[in-house]
Amino acid sequence: MQKLKDLMSRDVKVISPDMSIREAAREMRDGDFGMLPVGENDRMIGTISDRDIAIRAVAEGKDTGTKVRDVMSEGIAWAFEDDSVEEAAKIMSKRQVRRLPVVDRDKRLVGIVALGDFAVESSEIRPAAEALSEISKPSTTNLGSS
């Protein structure tokens, strides 16, 4: 059974919550990242994704100088580096996320795994397909009332 440490990206950039969303977007563009962990005082306090910037900032009319802390996602979902692909896929499915920070047993950030990594690098395609199916379902909590 393949472990996350075998296929995660170790190229992890952590950004400050006081960085502007413009700077965060540039980091994402330059590093080809869809999500960045947000750290403060040597702890991961959230994540910011391209979707967070689009939905919580641009769609709300916030300017590009808005701080990351004002649009980041809190309540971080993560997995351990020695977790299996299947365990990570379950977390991603439950939390409806496509990218997951990976930590060591001391809970230090050591990598990021994306849903696409499972399908590309793993022979265990089924967990990724199931997770994608769940993640892609529309959330009824986000729908407006008619």
Image (cartoon, helix red, strand yellow):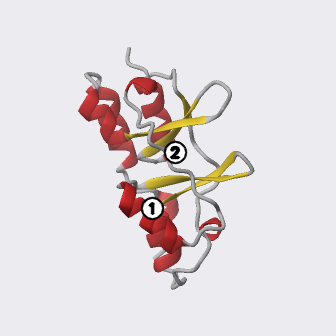
- Say left or right for 9 vs 23: left
Q: Position of residue 67 (x, y in %)?
A: 62, 72
- Say left or right for 36 vs 119: right
Q: Position of residue 20 (x, y in %)?
A: 57, 72
Q: CA distance from mark 1 to mark 2?
A: 24 Å
Q: Is residue 144 visible?
A: no
* Image quadrant containing the N terminus: top left
The image quarter containing residue 128 is top left
Check disc 1 and report its element: helix, strand or loop: helix
Residue 63 drawn above or below residue 42: below
Q: Amino acid at mark 2?
A: Arg
Check disc 2 and report its element: helix, strand or loop: helix
Of the numbered discs in the image, which one, if any, rests on residue 95?
A: 2
Disc nearer the start of the sequence (1/2): 1
Residue 54 drawn above or below residue 44: below
Residue extending farthest to the top is: 1
Q: Name the residue nearer the viewer: 94 or 47.
A: 47
Q: Name the residue nearer the viewer: 96 or 67.
A: 67
Query: Which residue corresponds to the image point at 65% horizontal and 49% vertical from the top-left?
Result: 75
Q: Position of residue 137 (x, y in %)?
A: 37, 51
Query: Which residue corresponds to the image point at 45% horizontal and 77% vertical from the top-left?
Result: 146
Q: Residues within 10 Å of mark 1 (few under 14, many from 20)?
A: some
Please give the residue where the numbered disc 1 appears in the rendered image. Answer: 27
Query: Which residue corresponds to the image point at 59% horizontal and 77% vertical from the top-left?
Result: 66
